[in-house]
């Protein structure tokens, strides 16, 4: 089982990170990728992940685009040789919160896509309520052979088909899958099937049912795996084998 999107370097884990990582391993989580949200946070991710041999993505979240330095891509590039770094992100567009001006979100996203293309690394995308603009940017900047994932995918079947069919992306499936009001998402994953799905927690946020409302952690990915297996009519082991294979191909693990 692979948690492809967590924030275990978050300060919410400072008091018990050893125990959190140990619980993940005991539950069968074989790999975790902890995701940076700006330059400083990406540095923190690298430093805190190394002793646990946890993988790292370095990037600038759309919420933080407003404070990204003008040479953000160069600063990220300087982090790529650090131990454990395997991806760029999370980056994208978030028009739900609009914490950064939309034009700035787009610039910072495009610079990270270009960086990923130059260095041949996969991209972790954060996308919320910006489908048309996000697809326009992908049509301009995303080229064949690039690898990427739309993390915390919560969209419709039509959006899932577009991300997979047009852009060859993976979809990160997290705790939202287990929420009572997520019937649209459940229909979407049933329609597209397991071929492009990977598991994630996005911890410390978005804990799945039956631990919803608690601080999320990588071991809770097991609840999402169980729900996804049930929806797809697969055994838990087959579902985990399929999503692990997807994650390994996506991130070259
Ligand atoms: Zn995100
Ligand atoms: Zn995240």
Image: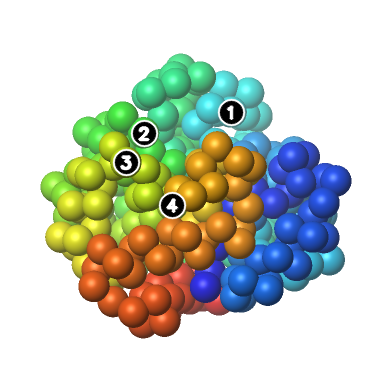
Mark 1–mark 2 distance (CA, rounded to whole Å): 15 Å
Q: Quadrant of residue 145?
A: bottom left
* Residue 89 shown left or right of residue 183 in the figure: right
Residue underneath mark 3? 180
- Disc 4 vs disc 3: which is toward the camera? 3
Mark 4 or mark 1, earlier in chain = 1
Mark 2–mark 4 distance (CA, rounded to whole Å): 14 Å
Mark 2 or mark 4, earlier in chain = 2
Residue underneath mark 2? 128
Residue occupying image coordinates x 55% and y 37%? 213
- Disc 4 vs disc 1: which is toward the camera? 4
Residue underneath mark 1? 64
Residue underneath mark 4? 174
Mark 1–mark 3 distance (CA, rounded to whole Å): 31 Å
Mark 4–mark 1 distance (CA, rounded to whole Å): 22 Å
Indicate how the structure is coloured in the image: rainbow
Q: Are marks 2 and 4 in contact (CB under 8 Å)?
A: no
Q: Please state, as top left, top right, bottom left or bottom right, where the C terminus lies in the image.
A: bottom right
- Label 4 crowd (10 A; few <14 / some 14-19 / many >=20): many
Is ligand 1 less than 8 Å from the beta carbon at label 2? yes
Residue occupying image coordinates x 79% and y 60%? 19
- Label 2 crowd (10 A; few <14 / some 14-19 / many >=20): some
Instruction: In this rendered view, identify the residue nearer to me: 34 or 222.
Output: 222
Mark 2–mark 3 distance (CA, rounded to whole Å): 20 Å
């Amino acid at each position: 089982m692979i948690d492809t999107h967590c924030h275990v370097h978050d300060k919410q884990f400072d008091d018990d990170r050893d125990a959190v990582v140990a619980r993940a391993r005991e539950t069968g989580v074989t790999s975790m990728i902890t995701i940076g949200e700006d330059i400083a946070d990406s540095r923190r991710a690298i430093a805190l992940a190394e002793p646990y041999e946890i993988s790292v993505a370095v990037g600038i979240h759309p919420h933080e685009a407003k404070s990204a330095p003008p040479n953000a891509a160069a600063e990220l590039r300087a982090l790529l040789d650090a131990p454990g770094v395997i991806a760029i992100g999370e980056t994208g567009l978030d028009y739900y919160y609009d914490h950064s001006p939309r034009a700035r979100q787009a610039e910072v996203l495009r610079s990270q896509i270009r960086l990923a293309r130059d260095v041949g690394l996969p991209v972790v995308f954060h996308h919320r309520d910006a489908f048309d603009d996000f697809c326009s940017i992908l049509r301009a900047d995303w080229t064949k052979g690039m690898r990427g994932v739309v993390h915390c995918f919560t969209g419709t079947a039509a959006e899932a088909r577009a991300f997979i069919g047009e852009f060859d992306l993976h979809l990160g499936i997290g705790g939202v899958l287990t929420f009572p009001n997520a019937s649209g998402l459940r229909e979407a994953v049933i329609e597209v099937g397991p071929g492009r799905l990977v598991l994630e927690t996005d911890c410390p946020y978005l804990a799945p049912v039956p631990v919803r409302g608690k601080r999320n952690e990588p071991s809770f990915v097991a609840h999402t795996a169980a729900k996804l297996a049930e929806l797809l009519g697969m055994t838990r082991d087959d579902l985990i084998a399929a999503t692990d294979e997807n994650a390994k191909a996506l991130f070259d693990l």
